[in-house]
Image (tube, rainbow, N blue to C red):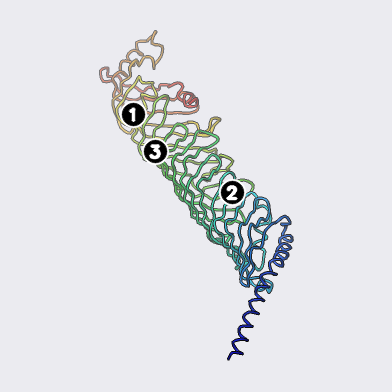
Amino acid sequence: MRTLSLAVGCFLVGGAAVIGAFEVACPSIVERDLGARLDAAGYSGASFSVARVTLDRIQLRDVTLAEGISLGDVEVTPGPLALWRGAEATVTLTRPRVELSALHMPAATAMSGHSQLRRVNIVDADVGIGIDRVVVRGSIDLSRGEPRLDLVVNAPVLHVGSTVARNMAAVIQGPVSAVHVVASARVDRIETASGPTTVDDAVVHAEIDADLSRRTFAIRGLMVAREARVARVTVHQPQLPFFLAGSASNGLHLRSDAPLVLTARTATIAVGDALIPLDTPVLTARGMSVLGGVDLQLGSDDVPLSVSATVHDVPLDNVIAAATRGRAHATGTIDGSLVFMRGANGLELRSGDLSTPTSGALRIAGAATLLGDPAQPFAVQARLAAALGDFVYSRISLHVDRNPDAVLSIEGRGRKIPQALLVDVNVRGLLAQNEKQ
């Protein structure tokens, strides 16, 4: 019995000595082998240190493949003996730091083209995107030939052109040819570089289906904001559902088969120097443009980008007072639409038609000044002016086009002077004021 115990003891001591010798000698062998593999993959300037080698794993420290690609601490399983026999490997990257601009180098291809690499786990990767940093966690499965992603991305701040998104979170899943992304972000402000279009305090939810190999994608979602401004229209609590297809080859291209339609709770529109309140307006964008370097097409028509604002039940008094600079007032409401198109100063008011659905009362102070020279009134002109001073209209309309004058059409009959009238009045400078402001 004592002899057996002594034999077992000698075996354990000898086995421990062999394992100890393996762990002492193997790091240098691993270092030479890994260095040669990285040289063959195009990373002749790579640096790393072998922290520990055991029978079931290899631990590396401070792995840097190239400038902008630091893999941090790396653990490889199984151990070197199994790997040298051709076993598949799982690599865990802990706190890597990577610049997205450096990934044109052979990093991804070297990883996906390695026949032994089965899975890459990513723990708290710090990825630089321009001036911003995002945190990436998850895994890349390489066991099925085509890489499959299962990643969570968080960004406290993300700049996209003039847009600043905060608290962005995204889940990225699927093979690279059919990646599915679910993302949400709070956006402090969106601005277009080409004109006065801004969105403040927006929350965006989106789902993206992408083929990373072809650099194509489809994105659908909803944006809800506190306020948005398009040219002279300011909308409050707008909602914008969207469905866009796009590609990132030779620039960023976005298209939608249908126009984008934005609805809002309330809005105001500047006409001349006045602000006109609107309830439940609808803004529709269609056409083609290049905004902030993005090639955009909304709808199937190859026409310049335009935004039309559809309004209902707008107090007529606000419109008439604005169009006549406070000289006229009226009861009732007015409906219609205004069209904004892209010009030298961004989106500009180009045309519009508003009209009253019912009759009402109209009073114009100093109506003679709207009809001609008040210093030399004709008898007919004086009678018309007197009728417009206290007037019941059957229809009022306002037409705006590229002529810097808007046309105010009034049809009805005077109260005190029973004169039937159909008058077209040029409202000078309405568009000119719009374009200056």
| Secondary structure of the residue carrying numbered label 2 | strand
Q: Going 36% across and 34% down the picture, which residue do you hit?
A: 278
The residue where tag 2 is placed is 128
Pick the front one: 184 or 322: 184
Secondary structure at numbered mark 1: helix
Residue 190, image x, y percentages:
49, 40
First in residue order: circle 2 vs circle 3? 2
Marks 2/1: CA–CA distance: 54 Å
Closer to the eye: label 3 or 1: 3
**In the image, is residue 411 above or below residue 158?**
above
Residue 28 percent location from the top left of the image: 71, 66
Q: Residue at image x 50%, y 54%?
A: 170
In the figure, 262 relative to 397: above or below? below
Per the image, label 3 sits on a secondary structure element best described as strand
Label 1, residues with CA under 10 Å away: few <14, some 14-19, many ≥20 = many
Q: Earlier in the sequence, mark 3 or mark 1?
A: 3
Residue on which disc 3 sits:
236
What amino acid is labelled 1 in the image?
Leu
On screen, 296 above or below 423? below
Which marked residue is nearer to the observer: mark 2 or mark 3? Answer: 2
Crowdedness near tag 2: few (<14), some (14–19) or many (≥20) residues, C-alpha within 10 Å: some
Instruction: Note whether 384 is above or below 348 in the view shown.
Output: above
- The answer to whether the residue labelled 2 contacts the one labelled 3, judged by CB atoms less than 8 Å apart, is no
Query: Which of the numbered marks, if any, corresponds to residue 316?
Result: 1
Q: Nearer the viewer, mark 2 or mark 1?
A: 2
